[in-house]
Image: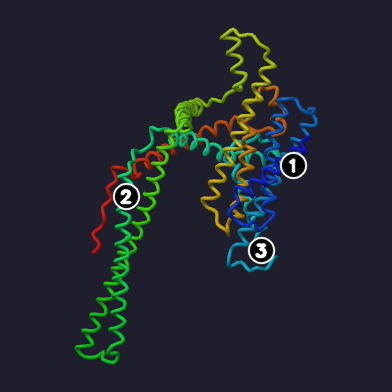
Amino acid sequence: MLGEFMIIFFGGGWVFFLKKLFRDYEVHHWLVLLIFSVTFALSCTMFELIIFEILGILNSSSRYFHWKLGLYAMLFTLVVVLPFYIAYFIVHNIGFVPPKKHIQILLTFISWVVFLYFFWKIGDPFPILSPKHGILSIEQCIGRIGVIGVTIMAVLSGFGAVNYPYTSMHYFVRPISDSDIQAHERRLMQTMDMIVMKKKRIAIAEQENRKRASSNPGNSGGIWGMVKNFTSSSGQENIRALRQDTIALEEMSRQLFLESVDLHNEQERKKYLKTFKGKYFNFLGHFFSIYCCWKIFISTINIVFDRVGKLDPVTKGIEIAVNWLGIQFDVMFWSQHISFWLVGIIIVTSIRGLLITLTKFFYAIASSKSSNVIVLCLAQLMGMYFVSSVLLMRMNMPSEYRSIVTEVLGDLQFNFYHRWFDVIFLISALGSMGFLYIAHKQAPGKESKETFPSYS
């Protein structure tokens, strides 16, 4: 059964790679596609095993074997395969490296050893596991991957908790009218006209200098030569000043163009929020703004009082229903089914959210030459993210289902990762608030009245 699902997940990663990430690029290396798809399949398989654990599919020994096999394969991919090939493609793309294969392999191996050194040093400042573990134990790798992955998760969660309400709520839409956009575009066109005028003056001045130099080529002495040299040098200074003015105007035109695009996007966003779908997301934005405030408050409490939750949300909710509300029901039945749906929702939203983020990030920085390296780096982040998701998701599972996950991951300091997540989440959320506040205040709108410098 797991083999069939593994093939399906591998195919899903393959299709996502070709249809989303590389749809505008030619696939130069099939190995990049293979490694990305394998990493995606291994990540999804770990989530699948969590679902199997809750539903009791397969026997316990079989699930344990597949947990170990999948985890070892993922660790080998994240620590050996991906870093080695990332280093190889970086070395291969460097222009001054000789194209000889053995030199590139040697430099790749040296780069991989350097990665292992820094990867190992990451775990030194953190209490990630018990001192009794050996230097080559599986917990050493999982612990260090957990630090990186939990940091990525917390940064993305903190930014998302702040950015989603900002982008989906009508309250944060700037009042942009058609007259504002027209005025901005008028300033842009005026700037473009000034650039054309300056370049014409430069061309005319250069043509006059060439004519002046071609006429009387031998008459460079005496008073006439001094006058000629003076007028020539003053002409060169005038051209230099015109070019500086042109560069400044071109930079201004770029800024005005970007601001004009931003104004159009803001106007489209305003129209979108008036639709049914926009109103729905506006409602969700209010919900997530409340969640963001609550999460920041809880994270602060957890950090200040060194608090880590002992009960999963399902067990806590059942205890409240039974002890406080007096509701009687089959605890085991509902615990299993609620856990299944809760963990399923977390898994689906985690995979979907990360894939959307990876796609946006790839299109923001990728080029035809660096695309292979970037895809492998994204696969590295994806694998670390999903391993850390399993590590943190353990707290959302009732104790009877989390035991095998705890056994497979090893004797890690799980409380440390939850505290670390709270710290990074709080920093990310507050930093995102400050960044979005500054960006919102500086964004063009009715109050933006750019003035032109007095270029003449």
Residue visible at 23% across and 80% down?
A: 231
Residue 404 in the image, given as x and y percentages of width and height: 72, 28
Front-most of 98 and 147?
98
Give the crowd class for mark 2: few <14, some 14-19, many >=20 residues within 10 Å: many
The answer to whether 392 is drawn above or below residue 398 in the figure is below
Of label 3 and label 1, which has the lower sequence position? Answer: 1
Residue 293 appears in view: no
Instruction: Look at label 2 and name its amino acid.
Output: His
The residue where tag 3 is placed is 104
x and y percent of residue 173 in the render? 38, 37
Q: Where is residue 96 in the image (x, y as percent from the top left)?
A: 58, 68
Q: Which residue is drawn at 61% across and 10% down?
A: 322
Quarter of the image for residue 346 reads: top right
Residue at the spot of label 1: 7
Mark 2 residue element: helix
Q: Earlier in the sequence, mark 3 or mark 2?
A: 3
Quarter of image, res 226: bottom left
In front: label 3 or label 1: 1
Residue closest to the eye, 79 or 127: 79
Q: Which residue is drawn at 71% across and 43% down?
A: 10
